[in-house]
Image (cartoon, grey):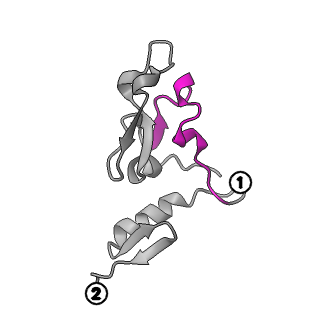
Amino acid sequence: MICLRCGRCCIDLDVAIVNPESIQPDGTINPRTSMIFKSKGRPCPHLDFRGNEALCKIHELPCYEGTPCRQFDQMGAPDDLCIMNSYFRSVQDNPHLMWNSKGFKRDPKAN
């Protein structure tokens, strides 16, 4: 998958992330306090924007290995553009759509 570096995954997903307070000076983590939960709609504290490009501040550090972010994979050919950006924009632009484990689902309260 070709990441568009839009940052949507780092904002719009519920995910366990490396606790910023557990990162040691050498880039490893204190295992007792290593992970915290980041809820959807809240930017990951490791997300950094440089212009319009989203970057991960810890992507190259040893503490990134084995995290849910590192293990995140998308279906599709390796040379396909990421589809998560358009998915998250669709949900944002159409609030009557909700995410569930099977994809889009109509909100029963929506007209």
Q: Which element type, helix, strand or loop, lies under badge 1?
A: loop
Seen in the picture, residue 44 relative to 91 is either above or below; the reply is above
Please, what secondary structure does the residue beneath circle 2 have? loop
Residue denoted by label 2: 111
Kind of residue sitting beneath label 2: Asn
Q: Between tags 1 and 2, which lies in front?
A: 2
Please state the extent of the stretch shown in magenta in the rendering: 53-75
Between 95 and 64, the residue placed more toward the observer is 64
Verify whether residue 61 appears in magenta: yes
Which three-letter amino acid code belongs to the residue tagged 1?
Answer: Asp
Residue 90 appears in the figure: no
- Name the quarter where the C terminus is drawn: bottom left
Q: Position of residue 72 (x, y in %)?
A: 58, 47
Above or below, 45 relative to 5:
above
* Residue at x 56%, y 61% (from the top left corner): 83
Can residue 109 be spotted in the picture?
A: yes
17 in relation to 63, above or below: below
Please give left or right for residue 19 compared with residue 58 in the image.
left
| Circle number at residue 35 | none
Circle 2 packing at 10 Å, graded few (<14), some (14-19), many (20+), is few
Does the magenta run of residues contain 62? yes
State the residue at coordinates (54%, 36%).
67
Q: What label does residue 79 carry, if any?
A: 1
